[in-house]
Image (cartoon, rainbow, N blue to C red):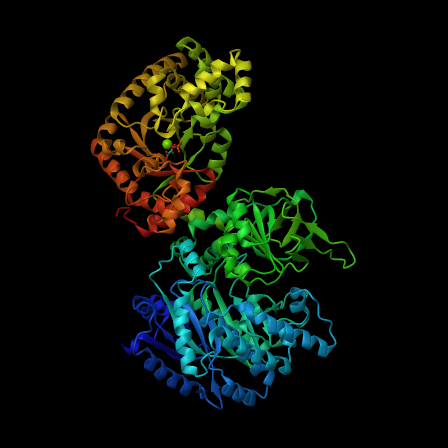
């Protein structure tokens, strides 16, 4: 083993630096960087991720030679601190923490106060003259070691703790509540005295003997066990789930940081806290965070005690760190400024004050809401800290959607039932759910749910993901619930102390602010609304407003527009959608699905009449009724898009989609059409298909019912002439769906040209139009050179192309696709993010072949993938001219297209 498998750090010098995240993990690399910067970090060393990988490769065995290397580094650490590991005086205690390349907050394990045993705890007692502190550190260590290394469930330790609370309460004359939640609140850990803790330690040791045969008392044995356990925690279910959700490869492994302990719970001159260099919820440039005097880090994060502000805020009376300890506050303030400038990004810091001395335990790029992500990126450009290109690449295009979350309509005039702390923005409504499993189950069944918990833990992750929003009774802006919800983009309100959950009765109660007032009772069948931007909690559903895309986001999108090569169009079927698409920056319509205009109550009747018509004459009569509707819609769409290209696709779906399925509906149709119910039922039966997605649809309808296509072409071109006469430019593009070869296109082109001549001569004006095809079938991609002889443009229908290339039914794949993704057979759902390897190869082939025949052929994509950032990156590289997505996703596509251009300036590869 080489010495470089362990990297040391101490203020002023470190073996590694921030560039070595792959090897040292994010935490280890940044600790090294901070040490190099002279920031006061407790000294320590990092065991590399390579060793973790080796550990797994060896089937979960620590490499030989690791122990002696660890011992060597411990000797160095002893020299650094002037303490002895296992020493009978001045004992050195260490923390053992995980640290992956990419931050996975709270997913893996940590052990604090390692090195304690009966002897060293006595030494610590002697040294600090604080028996309460020493025993408290010991019982925390026993719990963590028992849980993480020895696999003894954490809840086993609750009994002795609650017993100690009752004894402490009795000694202090405080009546102990029977309810455990209330007991923990009434008699917090800080009220336990040395007497109680002494007993707790004895009880804990007995628990470890009973369930794990005891714990190793030799500190080096403890440390080797802890290192292996932290490696193992890389594979625990919640870490695996988190990786899957965030696309982090399983192969990376975690580093282990062994660091000298510093204590924030040595008394009133000690403290601990977490801080952000900017507000992680709004992005505002203000030093922001929370601290607790006489506490350890986990107390802040667990939310059992409500932490106080760092900077003095209105209403604070001496409780902020700024007021309580101005000198430490100043030092911390200057350090955070230095770190933000150095890392050129918003930092999330953990610090501890040990007996009046400040230590930084961690710094990392802080998780933030999407809103904050945009604001920080844009403001850092203004401050000259980063470039515009860097800002564009820093904002995750996938998360921009969160900015489009609704907020409470100020005109709603409703009064909140209660308030908590705003932790992650967005206003959402859902049914209350009290457990992650229940939330997941109900969400899968299509119910909107709000997960309501006393506090959350990493075990709740799947429920948090499934829920629309999260509400907790405890915790601050840096609690688990807040950090995780923000990262996931879920609305979240924390620290809502007026709520309590009665698990037995399955109800939520909200106490009135007036103590004497009645409590409100909320059942799992009741809706509540939470506003993660203000912290308000409402009963029932509350009116919301759509957000406007102004300010920093508009500025960022302006920069994106200047960078991108791909044009962004929208899939819009109605004049309303077309207007919305333009306001969101769409530069045309890439797909107008004409059938969506058929479902209007007045029209569906004519559509059914057309479908049920016995002969051509009857069909043409029905089509004549539809013509004015279609023409009117196209007029409005052309007007709304004023001069931008509009691609209109001729009818695509199988006809049965327009027919009634239930007997009573059939009777209604028969009545309104004046025919027998049996006739309707017969026709429905005749049109029924086993595989409608591969059946009588797309241009196959035009081949068998050319009069339908003729009516649609007439409507489109009549509308185009009408709008052109108004002096508005029009660029209609007529698109044929689901063609697999040129003969279908030639047939449709003949119909189009005949109708066009009639329309133009009637209107006395000609408009230029393009005739093109979707590429939705593998055969069309393979024969694209031939199709391009007739088609002037291609638009890739990647929904159908995915379905037909993979042989996966769009409607049925949901039953097994998740399993495919879970097992890694497919990296992601191919209907969400393009299968670049397979379907992407067909796209590239069609691009090449299409261009070979028609070098200036216009190329776009209008499947759902047009709004997916990873797919957009591919389409940029494949050389398409535009992507078309739902109007709502247009801003995402604009940003993603700019990012693609920045990543691959040549646009090829
Ligand atoms: C497609 O198949 O990608 C497409 C855009 O058409 P539709 O989703 O309407 O089948
Ligand atoms: Mg399609």
Viewer-nearest residue: 102 or 230: 230
Counting from the top left corner in percent of width and height, residue 646 is at 40, 29
Which residue does the image show at 57% across and 69% down from the upper left? 300
Q: Residue furthest right?
A: 516
Counting from the top left corner in percent of width and height, residue 233 is at 42, 66
Which residue does the image show at 54% across and 44% down from the upper left? 548
The answer to whether residue 721 is visible is no
In the visual, does 382 lie left or right of 449? left
Count of marks placed on residues: 0
Displayed quadrant of residue 97: bottom left
The answer to whether residue 883 is visible is yes
In the visual, does 503 lie left or right of 89? right
Using the image, determine if residue 73 lies above or below residue 603: below
* Screen quadrant of the N terminus: bottom left
Using the image, determine if residue 351 lies above or below residue 605: below
Using the image, determine if residue 55 lies above or below residue 244: below
Counting from the top left corner in percent of width and height, residue 480 is at 53, 62
Ligand 1, by image quadrant, is top left
Counting from the top left corner in percent of width and height, residue 711 is at 41, 17
Q: Residue furthest top?
A: 617
In the visual, does 706 lie left or right of 656? left
In the visual, does 546 lie left or right of 37? right
Viewer-nearest residue: 839 or 70: 70
Using the image, determine if residue 712 lies above or below residue 800: above
């Amino acid at each position: 083993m080489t010495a470089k498998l362990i990297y040391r750090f101490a203020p002023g010098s470190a073996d590694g630096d921030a560039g070595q995240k792959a090897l040292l993990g994010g935490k280890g690399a940044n600790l090294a960087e901070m040490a190099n910067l002279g920031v006061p970090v407790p000294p320590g060393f990092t065991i590399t991720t390579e060793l973790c990988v080796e550990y797994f490769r060896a089937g979960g065995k620590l490499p030989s030679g690791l122990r002696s290397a660890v011992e060597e580094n411990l000797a160095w650490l002893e020299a650094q601190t002037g303490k002895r590991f296992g020493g009978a005086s001045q004992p050195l205690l260490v923390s053992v923490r995980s640290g992956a390349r990419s931050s996975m907050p709270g997913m893996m394990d940590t052990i604090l106060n390692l090195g304690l045993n009966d002897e060293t705890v006595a030494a610590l007692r002697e040294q600090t003259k604080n028996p309460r502190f020493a025993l408290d550190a010991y019982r925390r260590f026993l719990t963590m070691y028992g849980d993480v290394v020895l696999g003894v469930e954490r809840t086993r330790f609750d009994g002795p703790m609650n017993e100690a609370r009752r004894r402490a309460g009795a000694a202090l004359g405080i009546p102990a509540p029977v309810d455990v939640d209330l007991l923990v609140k009434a008699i917090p850990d800080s009220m336990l005295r040395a007497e109680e803790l002494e007993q707790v330690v004895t009880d804990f040791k007995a628990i470890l003997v009973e369930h794990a045969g005891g714990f190793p008392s030799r500190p080096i044995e403890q440390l080797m066990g802890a290192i292996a356990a932290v490696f193992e925690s890389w594979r625990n279910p919640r870490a695996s789930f988190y990786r899957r959700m965030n696309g982090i490869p399983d192969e990376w492994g975690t580093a282990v940081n062994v660091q000298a302990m510093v204590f924030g719970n040595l008394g009133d001159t000690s403290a601990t806290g977490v801080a952000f260099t900017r507000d992680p919820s709004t992005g505002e440039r203000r030093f922001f965070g929370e601290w607790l005097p006489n506490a350890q880090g986990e107390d802040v994060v667990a939310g059992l005690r409500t932490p106080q502000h760092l900077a003095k805020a209105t209403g604070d009376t001496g409780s902020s760190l700024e007021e309580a300890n101005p000198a430490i506050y100043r030092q911390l303030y200057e350090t955070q400024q230095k770190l933000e400038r150095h890392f050129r990004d918003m930092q999330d810091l953990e610090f501890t004050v040990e007996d009046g001395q400040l230590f930084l335990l961690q710094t990392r790029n802080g998780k933030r809401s999407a809103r904050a992500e945009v604001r920080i990126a844009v403001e850092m450009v203004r401050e000259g800290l980063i470039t515009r290109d860097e800002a564009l690449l820093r904002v995750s295009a996938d998360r921009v959607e969160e900015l489009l979350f609704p907020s409470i309509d100020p005109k709603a005039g409703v009064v909140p039932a209660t308030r908590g702390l705003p932790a992650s923005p967005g206003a959402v409504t859902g049914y209350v759910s009290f457990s992650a499993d229940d939330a997941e189950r109900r969400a899968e069944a299509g119910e909107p749910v709000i997960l309501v918990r006393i506090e959350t833990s990493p075990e709740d992750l799947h429920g948090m993901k499934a829920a629309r929003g999260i509400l907790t009774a405890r915790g601050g802006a840096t609690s688990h619930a807040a950090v995780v919800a923000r990262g996931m983009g879920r609305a979240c309100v924390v620290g809502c102390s007026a709520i309590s959950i009665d698990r037995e009765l399955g109800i939520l109660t909200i106490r009135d602010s007036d103590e004497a007032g009645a409590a409100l009772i909320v059942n799992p069948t009741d809706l509540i609304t939470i506003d993660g931007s203000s912290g308000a909690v409402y009963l029932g559903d509350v009116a919301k407003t759509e957000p406007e895309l102004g300010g920093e986001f508009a500025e960022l999108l302006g920069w994106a527009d200047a960078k991108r090569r791909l044009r962004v169009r929208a899939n819009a079927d109605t004049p309303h959608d077309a207007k919305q698409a333009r306001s969101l920056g769409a530069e045309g319509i890439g797909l107008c699905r004409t059938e969506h205009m058929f479902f209007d109550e007045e029209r569906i009747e004519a559509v059914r009449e057309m479908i049920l018509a016995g002969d051509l004459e009857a069909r043409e009569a029905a089509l004549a009724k539809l013509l004015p509707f279609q023409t009117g819609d196209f007029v409005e769409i052309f007007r709304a898009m004023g001069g931008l290209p509009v691609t209109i696709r001729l009818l695509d779906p199988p006809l049965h989609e327009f027919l009634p399925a239930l007997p009573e509906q059939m009777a209604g149709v028969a009545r309104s059409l004046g025919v027998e119910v049996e006739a309707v039922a017969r026709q429905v039966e005749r049109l029924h298909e086993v595989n409608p997605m591969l059946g009588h649809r797309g241009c196959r309808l035009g081949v068998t019912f050319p009069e339908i296509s003729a009516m649609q072409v007439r409507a489109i071109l009549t509308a185009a002439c009408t709008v052109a006469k108004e002096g508005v430019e029009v660029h209609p593009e007529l698109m044929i769906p689901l063609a697999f070869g040129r003969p279908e296109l030639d047939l449709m082109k003949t119909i189009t040209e005949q109708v066009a001549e009639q329309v133009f001569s009637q209107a006395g004006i000609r408009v230029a139009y393009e005739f093109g095809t979707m590429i939705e079938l593998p055969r069309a991609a393979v024969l694209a050179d031939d199709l391009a002889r007739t088609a002037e443009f291609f638009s890739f229908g990647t929904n159908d192309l995915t379905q037909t290339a993979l042989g996966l039914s769009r409607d049925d794949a949901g039953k097994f696709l998740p399993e495919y993704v879970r097992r890694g057979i497919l990296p992601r759902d191919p209907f969400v993010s393009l299968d670049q390897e397979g379907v992407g190869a067909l796209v590239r082939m069609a691009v090449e072949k299409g261009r070979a025949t028609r070098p200036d052929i216009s190329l776009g994509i209008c499947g759902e993938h047009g709004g997916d950032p990873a797919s957009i990156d591919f389409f940029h590289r494949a050389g398409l001219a535009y992507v078309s997505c739902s109007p709502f996703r247009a801003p995402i596509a604009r940003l993603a297209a700019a990012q693609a251009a920045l990543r691959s300036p040549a646009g090829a590869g």
